[in-house]
Amino acid sequence: MPSISYAPFFLLFSSALSFTPCPLLGPAFPPFSLDTNDKTVAGALQKLTQKFDTLVATNNGTHGDTSPNTTFSIALFSSDAGNAEDEPFFWQYHHTAPILNQSLVGSHTADKDSIYRIGGLTEVFTVWSLLLAGDGDQIFDDPVTKHLPELIDNTTREQDMNGRVRWEDVTVGQPASHMSGIVRDYCSTDVTLQTSSAEAGLPPLQAISIPCCGGDSKCDSSDFIRHLANQTRVAPAGETPIYSNMAFQLLGYIVEKRTGKPFSKVLHHIFDVLGMAETSIFAPNSTTAGIIPVSKEASGWSAHLEADIAQCTHCRSKSIFSSVKDLATAGQAILNSTLLSKPQTNRWFKPVSHTSNPANSIGSPWVIYSAGSYPNTSMVDIYTVLSNEGNDKSLYSSYLGLVPDFGVGFAILSADSDTPADLNAHADDIGDVVLTALMETATEQAARNFGGEYKVSNINSSIVVEYDSLPGLYIQEFVSNGTDFRATLAGLVGVAKPADLSIRLYPTQLVEDSGSGSKQGFRAVFQDVTELADAGTATCVSWLDIGRLRYGGHGLDEFIFSLDQSGQAVSVEIPALRISLQKS
């Protein structure tokens, strides 16, 4: 399992503090506007370029060694185009390994339009197409047998008792989230296809026991489902994450059943709508833009040529070819809910299960890495898909990462002449530099746009909003009708000294846009600054207390800021106090 480390990000707010905030899960600050000319962002991107220049010059970086034979392309993209509207990304980096010049076919120079085989990143599009095929993720609760009843028809009850998959217990969402409990592959990795059983010390198999799919053999959907139906399970459905290529093949067949269209046409509709002209479900006919190390056969480029997809057992899990430009376009579309509704996207960006690594969770089909170091920083989840099939399958590897809290993402595509590249070093460098800079940018813009005094002079009510090195904005002064309202709140929440009450504001992602600006909702978290920080126990439970204190039907922790068209706050409404304070 790949790992991503973000040490500098962890250290951003890690000085010894006597008070530990307990933020809500999610962004600690409102969305920021991307400006690549901003000092913080521009400095970070320059630093990132220097890091990769060093990496390709020395094949050694902060996070380990890399191969001199790896050609790669990287793009960073954002849901906010900012001042980088001419491309779907705001930073790119390309390196062409010298050995690529020896390739027999394809391009010998990597750029934004270079086409790579992206393998397992296909899974994102498989799940995306499933969500677009009908009622969104409502289908996740359906048993797979509702859409593929032949799975039951091909399975006997006696076989179920002997460890066969109980297909009626498997929901559609479980193959999408690695929770189906079915085996990884059926045919393509069977040892009978790779070596002589006698030479390897394996018992001989009768012909009937030898897999009939895989290698040079092909299976249509009926063959595939017949073989899959009688497979033994690795674990009960819903028990533990188990990766399976066959799970995504199964989802592809469900997409075909739901839409009445071949899977390739469903995917190409997504590509066409988004303008992903360099993306295809099979290897493109022209190799002019292709990054193809050695040859088409040796690289794995020709593994999925234009053919009847019904005979392709892995086309629904790892067959797509694309460029970083197109993947940046797709990443933006996911972050911006271009094809799905915003509520559906929010549900898609949620974990389904933990893994045995406490820093990792899994989603559909995401592997989710939690960056941050509670209690010193807010947690930031990175939703990723990594493809590295191994050099027996292809010489390509690819990495897609999305960070919903910051509205940013990255795409890394690579090809190597010897073995698929380990892209963790590349992703780690991005995390080290970019996440830190974006957190600083979010803090700076929040301070500039929301910080200051808000007041209504005729009734002597005011608040002063400030920022520090901790997550969220905070209220330094709070006066209501001439009364120290901090003291009132301290009494209500049980804090002995009003000066010890922390009032920190966190965005709730409730945003109402208008032609002249917007309104953004925040909730305050009240804490006693003298309370001891966590010492191995789960005491950060601010989410339990949101909305607990109410006055006249409104939460005393509710704040609604009004912003002008430039994003500057001009007023704040406190519904419980029936007042709207103007920014000075």
Image (spheres, rainbow, N blue to C red):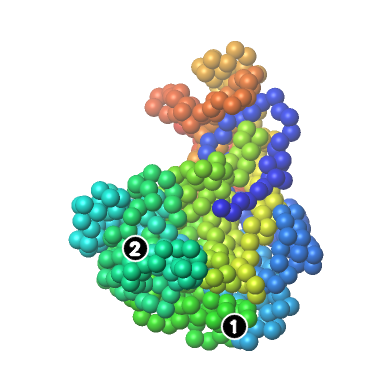
Residue at image location 62% in from the left, 17% down from the top: 498
Is residue 401 shown left or right of residue 308?
A: right
Q: Position of residue 507 (x, y in %)?
A: 53, 40
| Marking on residue 379 | none
Residue indicated by mark 2: 250
Residue at image location 32% in from the left, 62% down from the top: 228
Position of 399 relative to 502 (above/below): below
Q: Identify the amino acid type marked 1.
A: Ser
Image quadrant in which you'd find residue 247: bottom left
* Res. 277 in view: no
Is residue 283 shown left or right of residue 219?
A: right
Residue indicated by mark 1: 295
Classify mark 1: helix, strand or loop: loop
- Residue 509 vs residue 218, the one in the foreground: 218
What distance separates the C-alpha of mark 1 from that of mark 2? 31 Å
Is residue 432 shown left or right of residue 313?
A: right
Residue at image location 33% in from the left, 69% down from the top: 206
Position of 142 relative to 304 (above/below): above
* Res. 524 in view: yes
Classify mark 2: helix, strand or loop: helix
